[in-house]
Amino acid sequence: MLVIGICDSETSVRSLLTGFAERYCRETGTHLQLLSYSSGEKLLKNYMLDLDLVFLEIPFRKMNGLAIAERIRQQDLRVRIVFLTTVLSYVLEAYEAGVDNYLLKPLSYAKFCRELTRALEEKDHAEALCILEENKSGIYKIYLRQILYIETEKKHTLIHTGQEDIVSYRQMKQHEALFAGTSLVRCHAAYLVNLRYFQKLEGAILTLTNGAQIPVSRGRRAYVVEQIRRYGFTFHQKGKEDDAE
């Protein structure tokens, strides 16, 4: 499934892209989830890290699209950002702000499809992110999506997956560097936790969907809460339009 954000001040543009998305679903069988916003402020307020592609109008009345793109890129290095514009004067600045591409209005279905195809390819690549771990027992190929959490175990570290626990000779800081910018977050000196499996945070204990309870240190708690919110665990209603004027 591809999660798409449509951010444009014009209702007609949002409706057009929604129609394009529905047509793409019918023609390709791809599952899409659409999130619609009428302003950059609303997009930022309700931003979720599970967005794969954002169509972003430039400029906006209050906060221009370049500033919005920069704010998005500060918290999300993975999402594909595509500007919607009527002029080419901002294109160079857009790339400097971290934008991946642009579409000129009036928008065409063919170009829209190309952006979805690129986003799907990038998501497939990200989903395939993995490491090779070698220890005395053998060599293991471990995907990010398999990891529940990593903890320090004596002189080594232990990678907990849904199937088994794998001894690693990497230090915690090495794991942290390998998975920088992903859902694997350092919540304690001795723990990295995959927020993909976040269930709840109560006090200094973070509970995963499998019931595992992970300690969160006092000094890292604010950061962990921020990452939880950024990763999409908000009360935002997915699939509904966030464009109350």
Image (cartoon, helix red, strand yellow):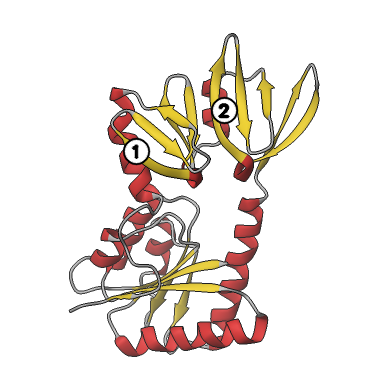
Q: How many marks?
A: 2
Identity of the amino acid at label 2? His
Observer able to see residue 74: no
Identity of the amino acid at label 1? Leu
Residue that carries the numbered disc 2 in the rendered image = 175
Left or right of residue 212, residue 134 in this image: right
Residue 222, picture quadrant: top left
135 up-or-down from 8: above or below: above
Q: Quadrant of the C terminus?
A: bottom left
Taking the spot 60% from the left edge, 59% from the top edge, the residue there is: 123
Q: Which mark is residue 141?
A: none
> Which of the two residues, 112 or 219, is positioned nearer the viewer here?
219
Q: Residues within 10 Å of mark 2 (few under 14, many from 20)?
A: some
> Which of the two residues, 60 or 124, is positioned nearer the viewer here?
124
13 up-or-down from 67: above or below: below
Q: Residues within 10 Å of mark 1 (few under 14, many from 20)?
A: some
Residue 143 on image: x %, y %: 67, 42
**SS category of the residue bearing label 1:** strand
Residue that carries the numbered disc 1 in the rendered image = 201
Observer able to see residue 143: yes
Left or right of residue 206, residue 158 in this image: right
